[in-house]
Image: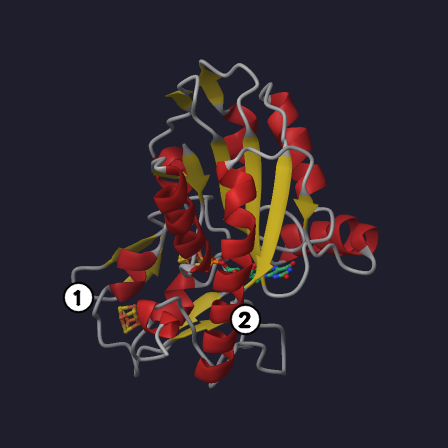
Amino acid sequence: MIFYFSGTGNTRYIASQLSLATGESMISIARAVVDNKYDYHLDADERVGICFPVHGWRPPFIVREFVRRLRLEGYDAQFCYAFATCGDDVGLTFDYLQADLLAAGIKLDSAFSVIMPETYNFPVIDQIDTPDSARHKIHAARAQLQQVLPAIVGRTHGLHLINKSRWPRINSQLLGSFFLNHWVTDAKFTVDASRCIGCGKCRQVCPVGNIGMTADKNPQWLHNGLCTTCFSCYHHCPAHAIDFAGRTRGKRQYFFKEQFLEG
Ligand SMILES: Cc1cc2nc3c(=O)[nH]c(=O)nc-3n(C[C@H](O)[C@H](O)[C@H](O)COP(=O)(O)O)c2cc1C
Ligand code: SF4
Ligand code: SF4
């Protein structure tokens, strides 16, 4: 059983590869939270996988809330692993996840992280990868995944193959809390009406159903309390009409595509 959250597709790709290798099904955390579904049955020979992107050197808040409320009927210390994708480093991400899992009575046995294309835009510089750089990172991530798959399939305990960062406490505790309190918000998204073509793609790709369309085809953020600022809406907009806090205009867009795996 693989629980996953993904905004722009990096983590969905990793989860899909884990699903292929283990034969276990993928369950969307975003969908589960929207549907208020926290009870699942785990078979005796199943693994528990938790896959997510790192947000502000922590698991996204929606992942943490889901994990804390998760009820796994049939859980009897089956192998549990976590797999994070990140643009750079994870800080204390897995310590937060471990505490959340323990609150749900589940022990984290092994943890993995892998660098994938960046999806977050800081002010001024353009952090988002060029297509070439994205392809390069995806190929490297795929190779790294192939190396750790046997450990996951074989249920190896005690592995922590993660890139923590140089100042994990400062990153996760100090900056992570500032980030969560001030920058995880859908109030900073705006749409340039002169560019928007009313295609509804932003609504389609929002993992938590936080975007609606008016009768005259204008997207509207619903402020449903579930926006993780995953930037899926921004990155998928074919007209580059969406901006966040005035910091993304004219910057690159990225989302995971199978074509990046070619070549
Ligand atoms: C809101 C937000 C915060 C992020 N914070 C971090 C971070 O703290 N450290 C990091 O290495 N990458 C960070 N990233 C980059 C993502 O973790 C990375 O691009 C991830 O692979 C995206 O996965 P997805 O495509 O499944 O959403 C952040 C991305 C977003 C959107
Ligand atoms: S509104 Fe945009 S940033 Fe927020 S969850 Fe939906 S797609 Fe992600
Ligand atoms: S994806 Fe972009 S162009 Fe399409 S409706 Fe949303 S904002 Fe408008």
**Residue 76 can be seen in this image:** yes
Q: Amino acid at mark 1?
A: Asp
Say which mark, if any, is on residue 245: 2
Element at badge 1?
A: loop
Q: Is 221 placed left or right of 107 in the picture?
A: left
* Displayed quadrant of residue 234: bottom left
Q: CA distance from mark 2 to mark 1?
A: 25 Å
Dot 2 alpha-carbon crowd within 10 angstroms: few under 14, some 14 to 19, many 20 or more: few
Farthest residue to the left: give it.
Answer: 215
* Residue 61 appears in view: no
Give the percent coordinates (x, y) of residue 126: 57, 81
Render colour scheme: secondary structure
Residue type pointed to by label 2: Ala
Query: Mark 1 packing: few (<14 Cα in 10 Å), some, or many (20+)?
Result: few
Q: Is residue 10 above or below residue 39?
A: below
Residue that carries the numbered disc 1 in the rendered image: 216
The x, y position of residue 134, in whole percent, is: 48, 75
